[in-house]
Image (tube, rainbow, N blue to C red):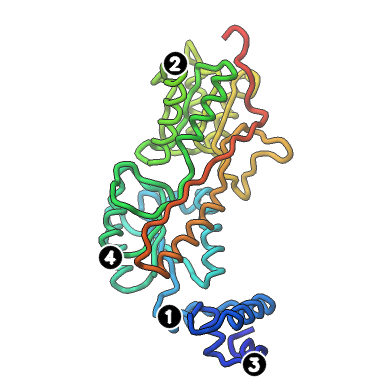
Amino acid sequence: MNLKKLSEELGLSQTTVSRALNGYPEVNEATRQRVQLAAEKFNYRPNSRAKGLATGRAMMVGHVIPASTQHEMVNPVFGDFVGGASEALARLGYDMMFTRVSEGDEENAYRELMAKRLVDGVILQGPSIADSRIALLNDLGLPFVVHGRSSGVDAPYSWVDVNNKRSFQRATEFLLDLGHTRIALINGLERMDFAKRRRDGYRAAFEQRGFSVDPELMRSAEMTEVYGHHETREMLRMDAPPTAILASSMISAMGVRRAIEEEGLKMGRDVSVITHDDDLSYLKNGQDVPIFTATRSSVHHAGEVLAGMLIDLIAEPTCPPITKMLEAELVVGRSTGPVPKGQ
């Protein structure tokens, strides 16, 4: 089904159908709904290039990936986020483009995207603390939404984030309620804002109960399976090993479980584990009963929400910043239990 055939089916001009699908105000509501229903019935999708010519927009959203984060392209979390965002963008007639740049050349990439009008807006992924990209994009006037937040940035900007501090505070409180006080944190890179907030939540739970945090039980690095395995194995061989472990990623948690089993211990009985679960499409946390007790928040859903917000900002350039806080659900699985007797 193309525009001409859809127009003939409706008995309307191609111009009227196009304007109805693109939300032009001169098309009355009854006609707009009729056209929309017909488009859905016949599975019509407007051509992005043609729509761009009609609206003066590129009908494209950009995503700049510096060399230092090239691993993100194969990260299942990144993949699910992009999946959610791209599905929402496609429903609105937009495409997504990725620009790979050398380290330190990110600013020039954003300026070029703006100058050449290659994109109508951009998604900023993986914000660090006091992320300089936010000020740059505000100065350029290029619509953008941040997946996450950046501590230390005072200027207003649009973002979608999960309540990382609160989710890890709740997870730590859950373990404290089970009697654990030797609780390890296997976190992400703490120059990243999400990891800082998770550490803050972990520490806040201890402080509110009057307990001190052991710095030896706080680890930070890129969240791989090998990292989770290595750090867990090292801590389990300490004179006073942790009886519980908080992991910032399902991928790291898989390494945590492997290390526990290699030490001849049982997860949930000898060592309790809680992880953050992004509800990944092909890395599910068990079936009927979750394998891991987890703080769950769908990154696919976050991508959908962010894409919708970005299109709203593109449509209304004078719109004030939009923000959306997503809460994580604490899901109890088979990986947690009371502190072992005698510990």
- Please tell me whether mark 1 sits on a helix, a strand or a loop: helix
Asked if residue 266 shows in the view, the reply is no
Q: Please give the name of the residue rendered at 56% of the width and 53% of the height, measured from the top-left corner.
A: 301
Residue denoted by label 1 = 55
Residue denoted by label 2 = 211
Q: Which mark is residue 11?
A: 3
- Residues tagged 2 and 3 counted as in contact (Cβ below 8 A): no
Location of residue 218 in the rendering, given as x and y in whole percent from the top left corner:
42, 25
Mark 2 and mark 3: span between their CA atoms? 73 Å
Q: Nearer the viewer, mark 1 or mark 4?
A: 1
Q: Please give the name of the residue rendered at 56% of the width and 36% of the height, measured from the top-left corner.
A: 295
Image quarter in which the C terminus is found: top right
Q: Nearer the viewer, mark 4 or mark 2?
A: 2
- Residues tagged 2 and 1 counted as in contact (Cβ below 8 A): no
- Please tell me whether mark 2 sits on a helix, a strand or a loop: loop
Q: Which mark is residue 111?
A: 4
